[in-house]
Image: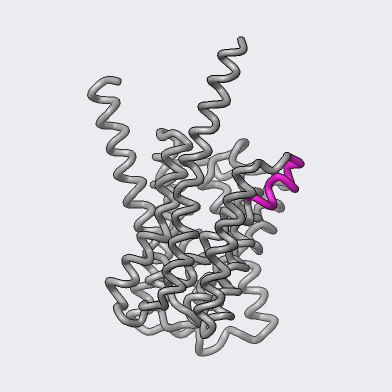
Amino acid sequence: MSQYKLSEVNRNLVILHLTVIVWGFTGILGALISTPAIPLVWYRVLIAFITLGIYFKFTNTSIWVSKNTFLKLFFTGAIVAGHWVLFFLSIKIATVSVALVCLSALTLFTAILEPIIERKKISKLEIVTGLFIISGIYLIFKFETNYTWGIICGLASALLASIFSIINGKQVKNRPAPIIAFYELIGAWFWVSLYLLYTRGFTADLVLSTSDWIYLLILGTICTSGAYVAGVSVMKELTAFKVALITNLEPIYGIILAFIIFGKREQMTIGFYAGACIVLSTIFLFPIIKNKLEKRRLRKQEHHI
């Protein structure tokens, strides 16, 4: 590999790590913003899709999609909205650490749902991974009884994230990821707005303090649209293995940041940390083992040929 190519790969790795740290910071901002989860998400998606729209305007990017595609993305936005509402609700009624570890169950739900939706056989590795994650979550449930509803919201958030990730996995084959995000964000904003209208939620909760405005602007621009565009651009240049390995560090970065910023407020029981270690080490090791098994399978195929 040439020196130039190596430095380019290293630059992309640094950008991806920084992007993942920014994603991890999302939970911190969710805890710092005083407004409830639903108005928080309403503002977040509004700021994010406006920012993406400005980005498309300056880059002369065509955002045209067919009516059928628009409707698919628009309705997927409802799932995206539900995911974020439940994620921030988990933070509000539990802690950042609890929400992030529960969100890691995304790997478990994807391992279960993807073979069902795609009509594929579930692998032994995915079964073992799922069992380890379940055992880790069980430990957290057992020791963090004060945060039961926060854990349930976090797991429900992970389930919805898994569903729209599988949907997006099909969509991204045909169109750029930022375009998908743009229409899903518009859909998310519409469905949250509809809920607020139905429940007469356009109240004082939508009146923000100066600090909330600052945090929301950071959340909607840097942590959502900015991080998304940066992440997608470097992901194209890196192997799927490296991308999976680094993105799985998001909850670890987030938990470390939460502990640094909030201190004792984020201190949990030994049982929580034991369960979190099982869950996080499992999702971190999953792509490593999967990559090794894939290489072994390819070597066997070459040997038979």
Seen at 57% across and 51% down, the residue is: 129
Q: Is residue 34 left or right of residue 211?
A: right
Q: Could you say where residue 118 lies in the image, as x and y percent from the top left?
A: 73, 42
Q: Could you say where residue 100 lies in the image, as x and y percent from the top left?
A: 47, 66
Residue 5 included in the magenta stretch of the image: no
Closest to the observer: 147 or 177? 147
- Check the image and name the residue furthest to the left: 3
In the picture, which quadrant includes the N terminus? top left
Q: Is residue 183 visible?
A: no
Which stretch appears magenta? 111-120
In the image, residue 151 above or below residue 110:
below
Seen at 59% across and 41% down, the residue is: 172
Q: Could you say where residue 168 lies in the image, as x and y percent from the top left?
A: 61, 47
Q: Magenta region's main secondary structure?
A: helix
Seen at 61% across and 10% down, the residue is: 305
Q: Could you say where residue 284 lies in the image, as x and y percent from the top left?
A: 45, 50
| Color style of the picture | one colour
In the image, residue 242 above or below residue 116:
above
Q: Is residue 27 left or right of residue 177?
A: left
Q: Is residue 268 left or right of residue 283?
A: left
Seen at 34% across and 71% down, the residue is: 258
In the image, residue 68 above or below residue 200:
above
Residue 113 included in the magenta stretch of the image: yes
